[in-house]
Amino acid sequence: MIDVILVGNPNTGKTTLYNTLTGAHEHVGNWHGVTVEQKSRTYSYKGNEIKLVDLPGIYSLTPLSYEESEGTEYLLSHRNSLIVNICDASNLQRNLYLTLGLLEAGAQVILVINQIDKKPICKIDFASLERELGLKVVYINASDKSSAAKLNDAIISYRPKAIKKLPYLDNLDFSIISDIKNIDKNDFFSKIKILEDDEAIKKRFNIDKKFDKLEEVASARYQYIDGVLSNASSIKTHPYGQSKFDKILLNRFLALPIFLLMLCLVFYITFFSLGAFLSDGLGFLLDKFIMSPFSNFLVDKFGQGSIIVSLFDVAIAGGAGTIISFLPQVALLFLFLSLLEDSGYLSRVAFVFDDLLSKVGLSGKSVYTLLMGFGCSTSAVLTARNMEDKNSKIKTALLTPYMSCSAKFPIYTVLGGAFFGAKNIFVIVMLYFLGVIIALFLSYLFEKTILKSKGQSFILEFPPYRAMSLKRTMSLLWQNIKLFLTRVASIILAMNIIVWVLSSFTATFKFIGDGQGVSLLQSLGMILSPIFIPLGFSSWGLISALIAGIVAKEVVVSSIAMFNGVDGAGSSIASTLFLSTSAAYFASASSVLSYLVFCLLYFPCVATCSVLWKEIGKKWTIIGVIIEFVIAYIFAMLTYHISIAFEIFSVWKVLLSLAALASVAISIALIIKKVRKNKLCPYSDNCSGGCKGCK
């Protein structure tokens, strides 16, 4: 068995290479923080078993965040393994900084130069680079299988060699640590880490003194790198990642409107034009060629109204079948998010929002987590690991569920579309923005009260803009389709069957498929319904759907379909929502709006709660869930009553209601800030705002 560790800076193609070598399908993206925990996989090549470990991206062996700490600790405890250090050919100066750290640590290294761009900004003399650094250099394209074979040949033929002493080590002043005992004179790695004030190394040698020579060490490394590259490469004049598009996309006045316009365009294509057309078509095909024929077969076999027929029509066709019809929209949403990632635009978005987020106690790193929350909150919470400040990590993780995940848009599409028609696009956009505004508002409150952030490093690079390859596009679509169908076939289908059982049997377990009797779920919904009367909805079907939605938000729509006896595609649910005889119905459009806001903000799904529990602990998970329910209740109630107040403006009341709701959130934040200023300032009546307490 050959043990190989794959390391590199973020955004060098590391995970792409891992997928190519092992045949895995790990998520890749053209931005920092995609890999947040180590992954390993064993594969065979020419009769050799190779165990490849993919570590989170790191910039050096001096960790500044969780994923860097995890990667560094693993590297230092497995120094005898073969290290494959991947660098981007267009960004060698910075990438080689990590390479020098590995050589200082005495690691056996194969240097992999990944040619990502067809037109790189530098041309490299690989023979010269090998001589200068004293290690094996392999030139590849991370996504190319022939390149993988070239690297595998280098791995199986590699033989350990004596580590070349790096010339710049003689220029560092180690005399200031000469009085430290128990340190080998040739242990340059420990000496350098002591000069850099590395806490782990200083603790090992019982050192309390501060040296603070990090800049001096970094300067020596970069001078050496510059000398190596001057002999081994020719670099064009334009900097890495620079693009003429940035003059527009990063313009201080245009950056935010362009980003919002992009999101609106994504939502329109996904939820309405193309997405709606594909979903309706899929729903029609499912009903005509699968659901209806099989339902008719069961009716002929077991008779109309039997338990088997009810189970299929209600739980499977009406529940899971309804959710499957949204598959095209799910695929489109993830496709567009991936386009934003791979294009390099997400890094620019982080830059644009860094200043805004810093005012509410977050950083540009939070942008990655929050934007991923639009896809799936569960996986997005994991990316909060890359924050070195514990409080910022907790805040970002707690705020992620306020980003409207893809599981919620069937709720918006079905319920909103039934009442608002074409105007539902404005409802959806405003719901997404409302979640963001509330998240920022809560972050501000946390920052000023119980979760104050410390200073954070935010290393930001602008990768070149890149087009998404057709191969990766198809692979990504298939992965998301497979994940969605697996979720439908397991969690959602199982939950639909449980909901069907609870809604089809009485407490004495008598089947009430004919509607005669009170089901277990109906009893629970009726007990809880008075709590939701101030929110404008109280039918037991709607309340029970919310309870089922805690497992998975898609189940809200499928549960409503079951309660209302729908056995076809999602579009047929709409007509039942107006009928007071239905188990789940709305009295007015204001009630629908309130329900949508509540679905946006109330409890995260069970999977997200479990990840929160693991990442930030039991206490903060419980606090976060309680806060979410309270926020959801308050804002849903405000939505309902504000919407009623705007009833006269029937066409635009949705926009006015949600805009007014956002204004309420902003106003509360400003009032709290004013109260805090008066509390801190001893001259609050006459202060101009320039004293220490008001700054």
Image: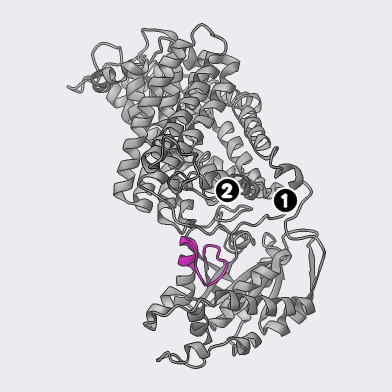
Circle 2: element type: helix
Q: Position of residue 664 (x, y in %)?
A: 46, 25
In-front residue for pair 306/58: 58
Q: Nearer the viewer, mark 1 or mark 2?
A: 2
**Residue that badge 2 annotates:** 354
Q: Which mark is residue 466?
A: 1
271 displayed left or right of 621: right
Residue at (74%, 47%) from the top-left corner? 246
- Callout 2: few (<14), some (14-19), or many (20+) C-alpha neighbours within 10 Å? some
Q: Residue 536 at x, y = what percent?
A: 37, 15
Which residues fall within the magenta stretch?
54-71
Q: Secondary structure at mark 1?
A: loop
- Tag 2: residue type? Asp
Q: Can you say whether 55 is above or below 619 in the image?
A: below
Which residue is found at the position 52% from the left and 72% from the top? Answer: 61
Q: Is residue 35 shown left or right of residue 179?
A: right
Magenta span: predominant SS is loop
**Residue 65 highlighted magenta (yes or no):** yes
Q: Earlier in the sequence, mark 1 or mark 2?
A: 2
Give the crowd class for mark 1: few <14, some 14-19, many >=20 residues within 10 Å: some
